[in-house]
Image (cartoon, grey):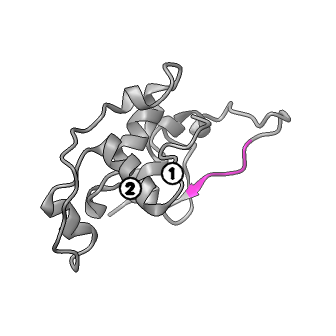
Amino acid sequence: LGQPIFPGDSGVDQLVEIIKVLGTPTKEQIQSMNPNYKEFKFPQIKAHPWAKVFRASTPQEAIDLISTIIEYTPSARPTPQQACLHAFFDELRMPETKLPSGRPLPPLEMDGGDDSRAGHGGHDTSAES
């Protein structure tokens, strides 16, 4: 990645950049973001494929993660924990993954102390009742 996704000189300029990628938000999406905003007069722009937003060398898992996080409807976005469990971060859950210094990664604790490297998905449902 290594670059701003929505470069802009002002809030309005950034909103234009967001619309260029996500497309024009629907009335429902605007309502979910801000119920007080009834008037919306945005230009009708089709969504731009995420794969064309980033360099060709960008991992597909990164594109997939970003496309789920950057979403107009707040309730459609993953929670932080869900985002951390995305396949993009699978390498961090592998016991053999080391820091550049060669030292092991610190324990990845999620959901009350489970070690996320213990299982592939980081969430052991067998212990739940």
| Numbered badge on residue 8 | 1
Q: Classify residue 94 by image quadrant.
A: top right
Relative to 50, is 45 on the left or the right?
A: left
Q: Is residue 108 magenta?
A: yes
Relative to 38, is 78 on the left or the right?
A: right
Q: In this view, does 17 lie above or below 62?
A: below
Q: Which secondary structure type mostly characterizes the magenta part of the structure?
A: loop
Disc 2, SS: helix
Q: Where is residue 29 in the image (x, y as percent from the top left)?
A: 20, 60
Which residues are drawn in magenta?
Answer: 105-109
Tell me the crowding category of disc 1: few under 14, some 14 to 19, or many 20 or more residues within 10 angstroms, Cα based: some
Q: Name the residue under label 2.
A: 15
Looking at the image, the residue that sits furthest to the top is 56
Contact, mark 2 vs mark 1 (Cβ under 8 Å): yes
Q: Residue at x 74, y 34 (%)?
A: 98
Tell me the crowding category of disc 2: few under 14, some 14 to 19, or many 20 or more residues within 10 angstroms, Cα based: few
- Which sits in the foreground, 33 or 9? 9
Disc 1, SS: loop
- Which sits in the foreground, 66 or 14? 14
Q: In this view, does 19 lie above or below 102?
A: below
Q: Does the magenta stretch include residue 53?
A: no
